[in-house]
Image (cartoon, rainbow, N blue to C red):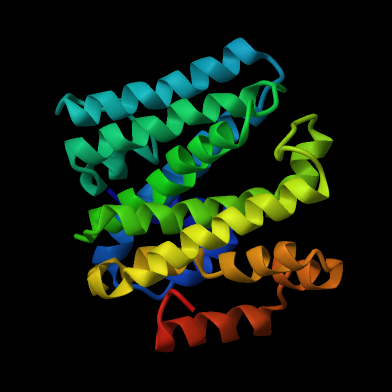
Amino acid sequence: MSLDACLTLVERADPDRFAAIRALPEDVLAKLLPILAFNIEVSRAPWVTQEAMIAEMRLQWWRDVLEEIAEGKPVRAHEVSSPLVDALTPDLARQLDLLVAARRWDIYSDPFENVGHQDEYLRDTGGVLMWVMAASLGGRNQDAIRHFGMAVGAAGFLKAMPALQAAGKSPVLGDLSGKQSLADRAMAWLHHAQSARRDIDAVATPALLTGWWARPILTGHQSGDQQTIERATNPSEFQRRARLAKLGLLGWWR
């Protein structure tokens, strides 16, 4: 099936990740685009309605899709679910189910119970997403890739914090100190992945490059400087291209 629908969705809804993959070969895009489009559909589900039951049903619909893929059954028709079949192994479909289950937190206004709960959410969202993308391309070293994905997820969380707070969510524990604590933990995850970079297959690089924007955001929140945070959160097109060019040349961990 054509990837056009997935490409359009990712380009519009996730421009930061799209910028990292738009020039990739078609066989790589055939893996990454359906996974990223799936992530968009799932992340949207809790926000398109104020009715918790409807949001739960939307998430369950995607869990059912993943179950069908995992069990080799015919998959219900959808512009994202159809190409997703060819992007996932049964095991990776089961992995993505963790991501959908974690997104149930987004439906409600309850804060995280503690730091461990927040980190678990990032493990099952950002960590799982990065691992599934990398594994779909043949990547290994699951531990390092998951830690990198957690760092990217934390950066995305910090980036989205104003919108989350406006929606009545409590995305961090505390205020400024909570942001800096999250940034510190995420930078440690990034460094953990970086220390294992020689053991990460080059074939996984396209997936890892989708987190190109994470380090500047984490660095900004570690410093607490609003101008640094603003530049990292809203880079100019020149800054975006320059960073992607640097990472493409020197490595995803920079």
Q: Which residue is situated farthest in the left direction here?
A: 72
Instruction: Find the residue positioned furthest to the top.
Output: 53
Q: Nearer the viewer, residue 194 or 215?
A: 194
Between 203 and 30, the residue placed more toward the observer is 203
Q: Position of residue 188 (x, y in %)?
A: 52, 60
Image x and y of residue 198, in percent: 27, 75
Which residue is at a point 77% across and 66% down the rendered structure image? 229
49 relative to 36, above or below: above
Position in image of residue 220 (x %, y %): 72, 68
For the image, the number of numbered tags is 0
Looking at the picture, how far across and down is residue 65, in whole percent? 32, 27
Q: Residue at x 27, y 32 (%)?
A: 94
1 lies left or right of 19: left
Say if residue 162 shows up in the picture.
yes
Name the quadrant containing residue 27. Answer: bottom left
Quadrant position of residue 79: top left
In the picture, measured across the screen, residue 221 lies left or right of residue 212, that is right
In the shown orientation, is residue 68 left or right of residue 221?
Answer: left
Vertical placement of residue 249 versus 130, above or below: below
Res 205 → quadrant: bottom left
Q: Is residue 133 visible?
A: no
Name the residue rendered at 42%, 21% in the picture: 61
Q: Is residue 137 above or below residue 245?
A: above
